[in-house]
Amino acid sequence: MDLKKVVVVLVALMLAVMVAGCGSVSEKVGEKAAEKMIEKGTGGKVDIKGDDVTIKTKEGDTEVSIGSKKLPDGFPKNFPLYKGAELQGSMSTKENGKTSMIVTLTSKDDYAKVVEFYNGKDKLGDYEVSSTLDLNEAFTLGLKKGDEDVGSVMIAKDEENTSLIITLNAK
């Protein structure tokens, strides 16, 4: 999905979330308006159900969950998630037989404690740790399967929480 389509999707999702707080009739109207806006921007078929959005295009499917607190279908069961971290949202795309997933989490735990959980491991589930980058309150692990780079774990400190963004590509 190109950048223009991603921007249209994000704007429409924000509109749907804002309208959804206004009640059931407004929620349905907001969902339909957002579906039409996303369909026009992506050329695909859109289905919004509460916090879940599915976009089907010729290139593949995109599923977005905002605030629904669920991992994407196909997220590896053996991938270690930081204990006590709260799932904020997720997104998955399926294109040309490959699935890409993004999961965002937050933890009340100190940044250093979260980094310690992930740092120094050779493997995270079925993924090999291929690189690490440690900047001032921003830590990233690169992940591989075989010779292919397939994801990352990014950990960052914000004012109140420690944020985690996990990206994975799967076949």
Image: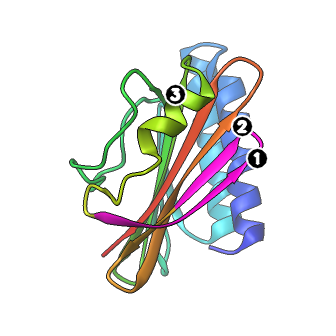
- Does residue 112 appear to the left or right of 51 in the view shown? right
Q: Quickly name the residue at label 3.
A: 113
Per the model, the C-alpha gap separating discs 2 and 1 is 5 Å
Q: Quickly name the residue at label 1.
A: 11
Q: Is residue 1 magenta?
A: no
Identify the secondary structure beneath mark 3: helix
How many residues crowd mark 3 within 10 Å: few (<14), some (14–19), many (20+)? Answer: few
Query: What percent of the width, then of the height, locates residue 64?
Result: 50, 48
Question: Amino acid under label 1?
Answer: Val
Q: Which residues are magenta?
A: 127-141
Q: Which mark is residue 89?
A: none
Which marked residue is nearer to the observer: mark 3 or mark 1?
3
The dominant secondary structure in magenta is strand
Query: What percent of the width, then of the height, locates residue 82?
Result: 40, 33
The residue lying toward the viewer, choosing from 62 and 24, is: 62
- Does residue 137 appear to the left or right of 155 in the view shown? right
